[in-house]
Amino acid sequence: MHTLSLNDWLAAHPDIEAVPERDLYVVARYMIPVDATLAQGCLEASGIPAMLADAHLMQTDLLLAPALGGVRLLVPAEHVQAAHEVLLALARGDFALDEDAPDGEWRTPT
């Protein structure tokens, strides 16, 4: 299986933005800060370092979120592709709690 270089992969994913003068990329934006925190937690639980930008600003006044572009979820360049896959898994519900599991155990992502 042929793997794309980061530049080729980024060309195919124009929604992923580079942070100027940093080795970081914006892999997602959230209008609700708690959604951003949840996504960050899923990335970190998957071994991907992630940080939030503008989360505190959004929490002070949610009406500013659309004007400022929401909370940005940032990851280092070497983790961009893996982060994208984890965020797709999160959107599919792969990290949802299994209601039938004892003590609300996490389901293992497939």
Image (cartoon, rainbow, N blue to C red):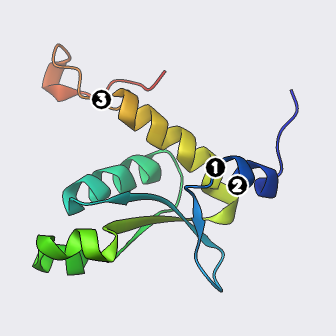
> Where is residue 79, by image quadrant?
bottom right
Q: Residue furthest bottom?
A: 21
Q: Do the residues labelled 1 and 2 touch (CB within 8 Å)?
A: yes
Mark 1 Cα within 10 Å, few/some/many (few <14, many 20+)? few
In the picture, the disc for residue 42 is: none
The residue carrying mark 1 is 13
- Mark 3 vs mark 2: give the one in front: 2
Residue nearest the observer in this picture, 67 or 86: 67
First in residue order: circle 3 vs circle 2: 2
The residue carrying mark 3 is 106
- Mark 3 vs mark 1: give the one in front: 1
**Residue 4 position within the rendered picture, expressed as x and y whole percent measured from the top left:** 82, 44
First in residue order: circle 3 vs circle 1: 1
In the picture, the disc for residue 10 is: 2
**Residue 50 position within the rendered picture, expressed as x and y whole percent measured from the top left:** 47, 63
Q: Could you tell me how far apart the alpha carbons at marks 3 and 1 are, in whole angstroms?
A: 30 Å
> Where is residue 7, by image quadrant?
bottom right
Residue nearest the observer in this picture, 106 or 54: 54
> Residue sitting at 30 percent across and 67 percent down?
70
Residue 18 lies, with reference to residue 41, above or below; the image says below
> Residue sitting at 74 percent across and 49 percent down?
9
User: How many numbered marks appear?
Assistant: 3
